[in-house]
Image (cartoon, grey):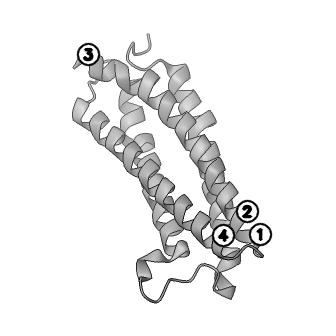
Amino acid sequence: MHSATAPWHFLDEALLRGHVPVRRALQRLVDQACALAPDGALAADEADPSTSLLGRIHALCELILLHLQREESYVFPLLRVPVLRLDPQAIRLMQRDHGEQLTCLQETRALVAERAADSLEDGRLAALELELVHLEQTLVELILLEEHHLYAPVLARA
């Protein structure tokens, strides 16, 4: 018998229809960002080095990948075993991660949009912005699935 808190098909769906597409979207984003990096399109503003788009994109990808790894190696295996109880605090940490990911993604999108508006002739930044939009859509779909079908039942039982 499978766990009532996280049916197998939702775990499998989160992995196959969530984590895999997010990883693909991250790879496309990194590929596009790296293609822009050599000519300085992603260079930091000398007045504020934290505005480096490449640095922001790298940080965003690391944040999301670390979260996916924690879910895959810790949270999801515990949800698969009905006799084990997952600490609700672990779920709250995953939810906090979701918020941080979306905030970082939105800030990065805003920075890319600003840079794209400043260099209208460079369609590569606009393409990078579209990749960020796609990543956001993919990530939001995954977060909604996890929040409603995996995490809410655990928290309801706590």
Amino acid carrying label 3: it is Arg
Residue at label 1? 123
User: Residue at left 28%, top 17%?
Assistant: 156
Q: Amino acid at mark 4?
A: Ala
Q: Are marks 1 and 2 in contact (CB under 8 Å)?
A: yes
Mark 1 to mark 2 CA distance (whole Å): 6 Å
Residue highlighted by disc 4: 116
C-alpha separation, residue under disc 4 versus residue under disc 2 = 9 Å
Q: Nearer the viewer, mark 3 or mark 1?
A: 1
Q: Residue at x 69, y 55 (%)?
A: 130
The residue under the point 63% across, 34% down is: 17
Q: Secondary structure at mark 4?
A: helix
Which quarter of the figure has residue 20? top right
Q: Earlier in the sequence, mark 1 or mark 4?
A: 4
Q: Earlier in the sequence, mark 3 or mark 1?
A: 1
Where is residue 1? Give x, y as percent.
44, 10
Circle on res. 127? 2
Q: Earlier in the sequence, mark 4 or mark 2?
A: 4
Tell me the kind of residue under disc 1.
Gly
Whether residue 74 appears in this view of the structure is yes
For label 4, the crowd category at 10 Å Cα-Cα, with few meaning under 14, some 14 to 19 and many 20 or more, is many
Residue at screen point 50% across, 77% down = 52
Q: Is residue 95 left or right of residue 33?
A: left
Q: Quadrant of the C terminus?
A: top left
